[in-house]
Amino acid sequence: MPRERVAALGIGTLAVVAGGFSLLLVGAPVGLAVRNLIAFAAGIGLGCLGQFLQPRETAFWPRFVLTCLMLSLVLIVGTTIGGVSRWLDFGLFTLQPGLILLPTLLTTLSQDHTGWRRAALLLAVILIAFQPDAATLTALALAMTVMLRVNVKPPALVTALIAVAFSLGAWLTLRNPDPVAFVEGTVQLAVQHGAVAIAVHAATMVLMLAPFLIVRKNGGLENFTFFALLALAGVVAAFPMPLAGSAVSPLVGYGAALALLTIPVRSRFAAPFRRAQAASTSI
């Protein structure tokens, strides 16, 4: 594994550890910090499994269908709090599918030369707008805008503009349930607990984003944008703070994206796919 990937994975893991430590500094139970580590490990496993089951070349559509299916289930049978539906209840835990699946989807779009795959993301944008979730919607919209640096095609450009418009609308009509202790409002907690808590919280955010700058290709910059916007939303409103808060879903999504970007896992279907692709191009 190339050194930059090892460094990115190591820094990302350090960010999760720092996030757990920041929770302890603001008085969170030890179990929440441990849960963060378990959620991150689950995300790493999810990312590795995704690579094993699906080669990168064909990964977009299965992940896209799964993402839209889970986002639809949120609207149909999801947990509703304060008029907002963002979660699926699995009994022992509640997950927010958009924060888990969207980062993995962003790692599959580097080969979108026509812009139509990015245009397909409009369905995910609409589903998130119905939840509504201004933070996730804005993070996705700006990640889609960052993608335009590579290839400005009309379908991708129009979709990005529509996504930005939806996100602005979500902020203008913002609805949020009351904040959950140690999940939202962690910046305010850190401020209340002094300079060390503030420094560790800030270090967690810097370390969280650094891996995506090290592995910028194949969705790295898009994930940088996505998680940076989630963190910013957690500062200005009652949204989960990734890594420095005890929110399981962004930790799973972070681990999955990091695994996809840094851990090379040979897909069991990659070789047959490449042989078929080579045969088709030689005809």
Image (tube, helix red, strand yellow):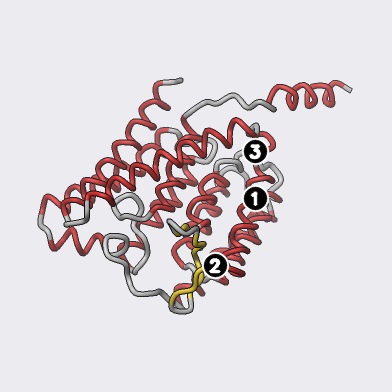
Query: What distance separates the C-alpha of mark 3 from that of mark 2?
Result: 33 Å
N-terminal label among 3 and 2: 2
Checking the image for residue 78, the label placed there is 2
N-terminal label among 1 and 2: 1
Checking the image for residue 64, the label placed there is 1
Secondary structure at badge 2 equals: loop
Count of marks placed on residues: 3
Above-or-below relation of 7 to 12: above
Above-or-below relation of 142 to 221: below
Amino acid type, mark 3: Gln
In the rendered image, residue 268, in percent from the top left (x then y), is placed at 66, 25
* Left/right of residue 71 with respect to residue 19 in the rendered view: right
Q: Residues within 10 Å of mark 2 (few under 14, many from 20)?
A: many
Amino acid type, mark 1: Phe
Above-or-below relation of 281 to 33: above
In the rendered image, residue 282, in percent from the top left (x then y), is placed at 85, 21
